[in-house]
Image (spheres, grey):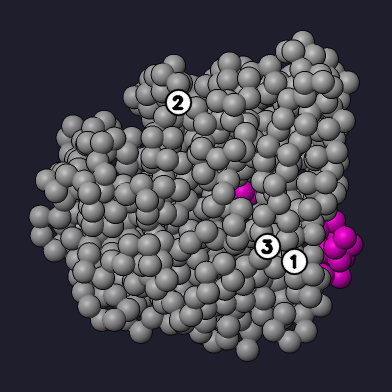
Amino acid sequence: MRWTKVLTVGAVASLGFVAACGAPSQTGTSSGASGSAASGGPVEGASAGLLPDAKGPAPEVPGATKGGTLTIAYSTTPANLDPSDQFYQDTAVILNLTNRALTTFTMRNGKMVLVPDLATDLGQKSADGLTWTFTLKDGLKYEDGSPVSAKDVAFAIKRSFDKDLAGNGPTYQRDFFKGGADYLGPYTGDKNWDGVQAPDDKTVVIRLAKKFETLPYFASFSQFSPIPEAKDKKKDYQLHVLATGPYMFDSYTPGSELRLKRNPNWDPASDPARNAYPDAYQFKWGVDEVKTQTAILASNGTDATTLNWDAIDSSLIDQIEGPKKAQFVEGPSSCVIAVNMDTRKIPMEIRKAIATAWPFDSIRKASGMTTHSYTPAKTLIPPQIPGWLDYSLPGLTGTGDGDPAKAKQMLAAAGYGPDKPFELVYYFTNDNATLQKGNQVRKQKLQAAGFKVTDMGVPAKERRKLVGKLNSKQNMLQSPAGWCFDWPSADSIFPPTVGSTALSQGGTGWGNLSDPKVDAEIKRISDLPIADQGPEWGKFDKWLQENYLVAVPDYYDKGNYVFGTKVKNVVNNPNKGMPELSQVWIQQ
């Protein structure tokens, strides 16, 4: 992750972050984008202070009024909305409106802080650091008025171990919880497993195999949102997730759209993080981002109350830098986008040839990308993380258009050529014009470098599932296509992406590694005091790429938001590169 040292400032226990240099600094506000986005300068450090005494209701946004429907339309499509299976930024943002967890993040005075959500505090740790206890607040209810029990939270956490329901979810619980590596979940697992227990209706106890100082951050994930066992429908549960937040499912068409309405049993007095200004939310997936962004900027009819969070298309730059500046926000993101390569199927020397050939500039141009939405990357840790190491390796520049001639030489040295080409196999989205253009260029450039390319076109709603399958025929561009840190420290980057646990759970990671040397080094760093971990993760980043080259860093992502003229207070969350939806309101 990215800890340097722990500070206490007044009533807020804060993690002191060292800001690295060399990447743009950007804070989005509803008044428009700052002009420094493409000019470089010091990067804004990620923030994740602790506010254990925060009480509800959440502070009001000045001038905000209730009412209206906020439409959010974007190009990708969630694979599902099951709380146990989520590890994507968009679904996390959506479920944060409907599902409360033990803790949650919120923005206070322009900085992200962790606050109690369903719990009364941020957890109580035992003297040895191996037992954490969370106590639930009084009077918590589901959408149907039934009470929330600690047993529901414990069941939900256990449910996140099930490989069928939660194969794409996080793996921290397997890595850290006592017996987590072998636990199979509540349906087939050990009935007496004591990694998570609820001794009464108000108390959740989590037992660890090793210290997990950042557990309160993990407890903000949807895997810690309560699910009553009696109402669990396994794979069908995602069709109507039982809400504890300010909104609940109204209608849901998987792969197409979701509509949320107000939850009458949400009590704002118990919620220190969420405002609830719109009467309803409508999410539309798989849209053409260029058409959508163009319509939003024109703001006719419902487009005036619509928000899009795809990267801004280059054809619209004159508008968002000129007369439509007030309808665009950009800001720091937690994500590094990378070209994932399966180390089990692609030899090291071939991976180096791919890095040498990679046409960064051509793909970005064909995909309509601009410097409003990215900064070239050369590391797997983003610069705002303390401990980030500014290193350079051959081919890992994030810029240029590749060297096809040199890549051919590297292939020849490895025994490949025109009569015996090395085949690259991957899925691409075939129902999005922009992504199709990007793939066409990618394929042509890789073929020009001597590779045989088998590109398998599938609809967006299918691709997210397919790229997360471990043993399919693809050998590159598997999930993850990048990584967004879960909290500001690299222990939320490398253990879940290159540790063996992801593969043992049936998921995919960078390089699909399962290597004892990598696991040992992750454990060594994780066992260090938080204050000492940052620089060691930076060194690990360089060592990993030198010895394994699991992925080619492409770019450091930026949050981009285009919104209609009646959408107000669009603020970037720098820890996610996503908007703070609970603070957005609609002008009536």
Is residue 356 toward the left or the right of residue 133 in the image? right
Residue that mark 2 sits on: 514
Q: Which of 87 and 237 lies nearest the eye of the viewer?
A: 237
Number of other residues with Cα within 10 Å of mark 2, as a class: few under 14, some 14 to 19, many 20 or more: some
Residue type, label 3: Ser
Residue type, label 2: Ser
Q: Which label is found at residue 21?
A: none
- Secondary structure beneath dot 3 equals loop
Is residue 96 toward the left or the right of residue 373 in the image? left
Q: Quadrant of residue 101?
A: bottom left
Q: Quadrant of residue 394?
A: top right
Q: Earlier in the sequence, mark 3 or mark 1?
A: 3
The total of numbered circles placed on residues is: 3
- Secondary structure beneath dot 2 equals loop
Q: Which label is found at residue 288?
A: 1
C-alpha span from label 3 to label 1: 6 Å
Q: Position of residue 282 (x, y in %)?
A: 57, 77
Residue that mark 3 sits on: 75
Name the residue at the front extreme. Answer: 419
Q: Which residue is at 71% across, 81% downward?
A: 304
- State which region is magenta: 313-333
As for residue 322 lying within the magenta part, the answer is yes
Q: Position of residue 503 (x, y in %)?
A: 43, 35
Q: Which residue is at 80% across, 40% downward?
A: 442
Q: Earlier in the sequence, mark 2 or mark 3?
A: 3
Q: Which residue is at 19% across, 54% downward?
A: 204
Above or below: residue 255 compared with residue 422: below
Number of other residues with Cα within 10 Å of mark 3, as a class: few under 14, some 14 to 19, many 20 or more: many
Q: Which residue is at 74% across, 64% downward?
A: 289
